[in-house]
Image (cartoon, rainbow, N blue to C red):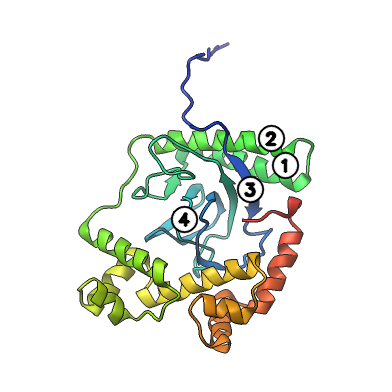
Amino acid sequence: MPLFMFKNDTQNCFDGAQAPQLVFVSDVETAYSKMALPLHSHAHLIEIAYVYKGSGTHFIGSRSYTVREGDILIFNAGVVHDDSSLPDSVEGLICLGFTGLQIDGLPENHLIPPDAAAVVSTGEHMAEAAALFRMVYRQMEDGRELCEDFCNAALRAILLLLRQLLGSGEERLCGKEHELVGSIKAYIDRNYAEPLTLSGIADVFYINPYYASHIFKAVTGYSPIQYITRRRIGEAQSLLTFTSHSVTEVAAMVGYDNPNYFSTVFSKLVGMSPVKYRQSWENSRDGLPGGAQS
């Protein structure tokens, strides 16, 4: 029978006095009833999601990715991304949100460098990854004794598996066009609540509006105007979910002077009115084990 000995001097690849701690776990297909979350971000939270069913397109950072069963999506803290907002999005994924991650050489709550590819294929390790993610969800779903301790230990195992998969050869975004698109995206992220126009954005970067639209869509999958709209609605969803601001106040905060127009855009993109969305999210969240939040 093979025997494998452990080294006592193994170096810890996670810095900091505390280990990463889970904030929430969700099955996007079941727990959230597939409510669309257009472009949004979490300033102090990192998320990883395992695709267990289907394939499709997801936007993370400054580009679109084609993802399939067995892939793991990585959303560093502060990175803009969508959740099941595209028509061909995956049908099911288990998402873990956590904080307290510190890796040498990276900002807090970053698993990969900003220019690294945010989708990792588990390949021959698919069964291992699927089992770990499902164990975490089932522990919380069943509310077993010591389930939170179990899940945080499993999170560490998942992160170590990811580090193995990432290795030292992560794909990096490169090229002048990618850099320009990243700059345009960052500009929109800072100013999405302002009355932005394509020509105005192009003027900021001293480029032709057609060229700006062409390269932006080629890299991200969205036109600049579509990105602005999704960014606004994504932020509106966060405000409706985690604050008590009225719909009119939320509309103004994300750049819409007319609350009726805001409601029309919101309903078209999300599939329900802002009021209905707030009610549906509260009902869905209340039904989750431990009242999980992101």
In the figure, is residue 293 to the left or right of 110?
right
Gap between marks 2 and 3 measured at Cα: 14 Å
Q: In this rendering, is residue 102 above or below 59?
A: above
Which residue is disc 1 drawn over?
139
Q: Within the image, what quadrant is residue 150 found in?
A: top right
Q: Within the image, what quadrant is residue 35 found in?
A: bottom right
Residue under the image location 64 percent in, 49 percent down: 25
Task: Kindly state the secondary structure of the residue where label 4 is placed.
Answer: loop
Task: Kindly state the secondary structure of the residue where label 2 is placed.
Answer: helix
Check contact, mark 3 vs mark 1: CB within 8 A.
Answer: no
Q: Is residue 273 visible?
A: no
Question: What amino acid type should be assigned to the residue bearing mark 3?
Answer: Val
Question: What amino acid type should be assigned to the residue bearing mark 2?
Answer: Phe
Check contact, mark 3 vs mark 4: CB within 8 A.
Answer: no
Which residue is disc 3 drawn over?
23
Question: What amino acid type should be assigned to the residue bearing mark 1?
Answer: Gln
